[in-house]
Image: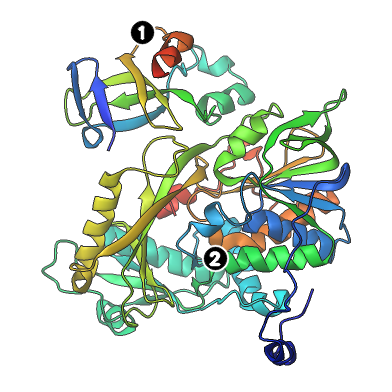
């Protein structure tokens, strides 16, 4: 079972309290009517599906109920960090350094 | 290739079965191929087989990072059915079920296809309405499927609990009698043997590290552990790793790779005559010829390449099995494993051309690719040979995520399938 740190509750809790919510840092287009079909496709459907450190969203469903972001290695399933929604992407190099 | 028949069996019996030749050679890559297929699972090997047999293209290499049939072909729960809601899916999956009927004869290899029937249980009024809609839709498409009352379900599969007082009572079921199971490894082996006999090179333990494109953008070959191999066409059929392989050619796919787990019980005497699926409590079950119950359910919720998966999902699966089949609730499970499934947003596959000339992809089979192996391989081979889709896979394009013409089996089934 994954143990996930909620950055709002500041607690590390079992995965069953959380809901996965897909790749992180995908911003909804500001002017939907001006967006091309190709860009809609990228926004709605295309995903990096990374094998390695993956930026992703989680929701603390059975806790505070809030969304937050995480970086998790999709090979080992190990979390590198979690951080509040809206915060910038953490620097990958310093995170993966910590893994070694 | 020595044909398997009674005469050869008898002949080899005289020498103690010590003189059978190998079923396929352990090939080393040549410098150039007409077609390179990335991924030696059932879909990839099958495509090579049909390319060689039906399209006369034999200068083919099927390349795999591991051993053939060692990915999802050898990790699934072997369920075969075609009771999908939409016309496009019904045609694709029923094409496959058609090919399953004669596959052992076609390949001269016993794939142990057993059309023991697949029963999908309804536990809520919504389930009943939705499954009846499936039954009607299937019958309009000429796909076998019929409705059973709870008593008829019990008669067809005695271990089912149809008590009205259970938490999720069985309110009926949709039965596809043509559905069933097959021996998954044998499918890969049979296609490998058939393809190799027609001159296809099967190159194992050789990872494709990148797809290389020429100055005009079209594919020129692949980089592998054993060096660069030139190819006129490259076809990717790499299951959970399709995104990773296709990214090297600069193609982003609408896929998310997630672990799907399965487990088997200790072997018991024959007690379970068919395949039973329950979407509402979410588990599916059949009994192998060895006597083990083969059990599965849905994917883990997160992207992962770990081929492992989490225990909460196993607990959920076992809870569902114990709910529907209380007879099994004291059974011990022997082992569990995971495979990485590549899931599309509409839970329908993508089989066809890509924006890159001479690069083809067969992906997005998610949690239900095994049943489609022969049909998928057949239409994929057609697509590669003719550089245009077969009418059956024409709707399953990559472009549908741009045009919005989805084939939304995700919404139709309400679960991954």
Provide the secondary structure element on which disc 1 rests: loop
On residue B192, which mark appears?
A: none
The residue where tag 2 is placed is B184
In which quadrant of the rendered image does the N terminus of chain B lie? bottom right
**In this rendering, position of residue B4 left or right of residue B318:** right
Measured as percent of width and height from the top left, residue B136 is found at 46, 69
> Taking B401 as reference, is B68 above or below it?
below
Residue A32 seen by the camera: yes
The residue most toward the left is: B165
**Quadrant position of residue A54:** top left
Nearest to the observer: residue B152 or residue B10: B10
Provide the secondary structure element on which disc 2 rests: helix
Residue occupying image coordinates x 66% and y 34%: B246
Nearest to the observer: residue B321 or residue B168: B321
Indicate how the structure is coloured in the image: rainbow
Residue occupying image coordinates x 78% and y 78%: B2
Measured as percent of width and height from the top left, residue A82 is found at 32, 17
C-alpha distance separating marks 1 and 2: 47 Å
Measured as percent of width and height from the top left, residue B233 is found at 82, 43
Measured as percent of width and height from the top left, residue A28 is found at 46, 18
> Taking B321 as reference, is A22 above or below it?
above
**Which of the chains bears the disc numbered 1?**
A
Nearest to the observer: residue B387 or residue B401: B387
Marks 1 and 2: which is nearer the front? 2
Q: Residues within 10 Å of mark 2 (few under 14, many from 20)?
A: many
**Quadrant position of residue B370:** bottom right
**In this rendering, position of residue B116 left or right of residue B360:** left
The residue where tag 1 is placed is A87
């Amino acid at each position: 079972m994954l143990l996930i740190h909620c950055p709002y509750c500041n607690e590390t809790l079992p995965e069953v309290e959380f809901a996965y919510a897909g790749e992180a840092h995908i911003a909804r287009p500001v002017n939907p009517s001006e967006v091309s079909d190709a860009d809609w496709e990228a926004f709605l459907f295309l995903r990096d599906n990374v094998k390695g450190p993956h930026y992703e969203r989680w929701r603390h469903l059975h806790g505070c109920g809030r969304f937050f972001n995480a970086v998790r290695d999709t090979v080992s399933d190990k979390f590198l960090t979690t951080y509040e929604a809206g915060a910038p992407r953490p620097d990958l190099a310093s995170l993966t350094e910590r893994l070694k | 290739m020595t044909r398997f028949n009674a005469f050869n069996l008898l002949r080899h019996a005289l020498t103690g079965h010590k003189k059978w030749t190998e079923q396929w050679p352990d090939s080393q890559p040549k410098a150039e191929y007409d077609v390179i297929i990335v991924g030696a699972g059932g879909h990839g090997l099958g495509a090579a087989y049909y390319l060689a047999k039906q399209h006369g293209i034999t200068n083919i290499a099927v390349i795999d990072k591991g051993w053939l049939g060692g990915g999802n072909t050898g990790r699934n729960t072997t369920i075969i059915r075609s009771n999908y809601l939409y016309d496009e899916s019904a045609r694709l999956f029923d094409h496959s079920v058609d090919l399953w009927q004669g596959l052992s004869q076609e390949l001269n290899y016993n794939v142990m296809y057993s059309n023991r029937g697949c029963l999908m249980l309804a536990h809520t009024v919504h389930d009943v309405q939705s499954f009846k809609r499936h039954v009607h839709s299937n019958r309009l498409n000429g796909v076998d499927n019929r409705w059973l009352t709870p008593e008829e379900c019990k008669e067809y599969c005695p271990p089912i609990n149809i008590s009205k007082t259970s938490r999720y009572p069985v309110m009926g079921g949709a039965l596809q009698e043509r559905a069933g199971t097959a021996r998954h490894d044998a499918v890969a082996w049979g296609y490998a043997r058939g393809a190799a006999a027609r001159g296809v090179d099967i190159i194992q333990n050789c990872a494709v590290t990148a797809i290389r494109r020429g100055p005009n953008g079209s594919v020129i070959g692949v980089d592998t552990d054993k060096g660069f191999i030139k190819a006129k066409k490259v076809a990717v059929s790499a299951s959970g790793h399709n995104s990773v392989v296709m990214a090297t050619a600069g193609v982003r796919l609408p896929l998310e790779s997630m672990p799907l787990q399965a487990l088997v019980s200790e072997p018991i005497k024959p007690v379970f005559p068919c395949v039973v699926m329950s979407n509402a409590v979410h588990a599916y079950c059949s009994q192998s010829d060895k006597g083990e119950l083969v059990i599965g359910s849905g994917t883990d919720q997160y992207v992962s390449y770990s081929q492992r998966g989490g225990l909460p999902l196993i607990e959920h699966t076992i809870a569902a099995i114990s709910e529907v089949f209380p007879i099994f609730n004291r059974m011990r499970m022997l082992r569990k494993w995971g495979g990485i499934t590549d899931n599309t947003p509409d839970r329908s596959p993508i089989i066809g051309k890509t924006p890159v000339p001479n690069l083809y992809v067969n992906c997005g089979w998610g949690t239900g690719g095994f049943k489609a192996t022969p049909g998928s391989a057949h239409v994929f081979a057609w697509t590669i040979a003719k550089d245009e889709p077969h009418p059956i896979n024409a709707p399953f394009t990559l472009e549908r995520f741009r045009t919005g013409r989805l084939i939304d089996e995700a919404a139709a089934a309400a679960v991954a399938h």
